[in-house]
Amino acid sequence: MCDSATEKRGVYEGEVAANELLCRKHWRLRLRVTALPPSRPGQFVQLQCRPIREQVSAREVEWADGQLPQFTQPELTDKEPLLRRPLSIGGRRDTGATAELDLIYRAVGTGTTWLSGVRAGDRLSVIGPLGNAFPVSQHKPRAALVGGGVGIPPMLCLADAIGRGKQATAFCGVRSQHLLPLTLTGKPDADGRPGACAEEFARSGATTVVASDDGTVGYEGLVTDALLHWLRAEAVPADDLVVYACGPEPMMRAAADLCIELGIECYVSLERIMACGMGTCQSCVVKIRDDSRQGWAYKLCCSDGPVFPADAVVW
């Protein structure tokens, strides 16, 4: 399971245990990594989406005047990505010194499309654990976990960390039923009432609300609308609840605005294009409120985040 401690990150070589299609676009990669430090919900890894090869020395490429050079390396011909891909940790099981990670991803580009073709026994390079984590409140008895699309996986890890000591409800938003990366064991309620309909959340004792934009599964509409409907129906006191959100930025902003209006503690896990994932390249900046004259400062999504208090983000 996801641990409450954190240690130094590192570069590791992992073995693929399984790589299975969950729905039309989403895959679940199970990766076994030895000696990986403990991780917490909300953290991520940087995965190299190409085979592990020995380092080769640089070589010169010559070409005649007026002609373009002919490159053959796969990372230069769009067959394999040069940069690693950040993937949220969706689950973790430790057996001795070996951790088995669940990495749920959507195959949309060169890197993730290549990743969808790996098989059991293949070996991949992984850096992690990276980033900060969702703070798990010790004194608030209820939690709402709001995930949209590829923002659902970190909520699985968070549900596991929260466990059965709190009343947790997961809100999962998708465009359509064929894009839901969960195993349904029952029919999600069309009126947005929580139930034990998703196997992955039910294992942690959490109930689930599914919302789809086109109404093909569960509540018809935006997942934030389903959240508001639940808040009104349950009449949960603001002081008893923490909301966590991850997914498309408009969805997270809507959840943040709602929680700020109602006085509910809320945390969002932001997403940016990350070249390194460790704060070196400075490419994943976000605006975070501070006490400076201009009222905000740039922070790095990868190392200062990806989790930030909702009321601190300058959208």
Image: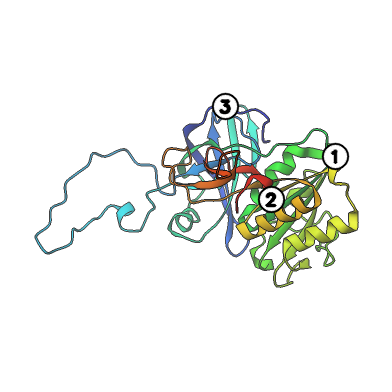
Residue at 48 percent of width and 47 percent of height:
284
Tell me which amino acid carries mark 3: Glu
Spot occupied by residue 192 in the image (x, y as percentages of width and height)? 83, 62
The alpha-carbon separation of the residues under discs 2 and 3 comes to 25 Å
Q: Residue furthest front?
A: 293
The numbered mark, 2 or 3, whose residue comes first in the sequence reads 3
Residue at 69 percent of width and 58 percent of height:
254
Is 285 or 23 nearer to us in this picture?
Answer: 285
Q: Quadrant of the N terminus?
A: top right
Residue 286 seen in the figure:
yes
The alpha-carbon separation of the residues under discs 1 and 3 comes to 28 Å
- Residue 245: which numbered mark, if any? 2
Residues under numbered marks 1 and 2 in contact, where contact means CB atoms less than 8 Å apart: no
Apparent side of residue 62 relative to residue 176 in the rendered image (left or right): left
Apparent side of residue 286 relative to residue 282 in the rendered image (left or right): right
Residue 195, compared with residue 238, is above or below; it is below
- Residue 141: which numbered mark, if any? 1
Residue marked by disc 3: 7
Is 190 or 307 nearer to us in this picture?
Answer: 307
Residues under numbered marks 1 and 3 in contact, where contact means CB atoms less than 8 Å apart: no
Residue at 60 percent of width and 65 percent of height:
24
Q: Secondary structure at mark 1?
A: loop
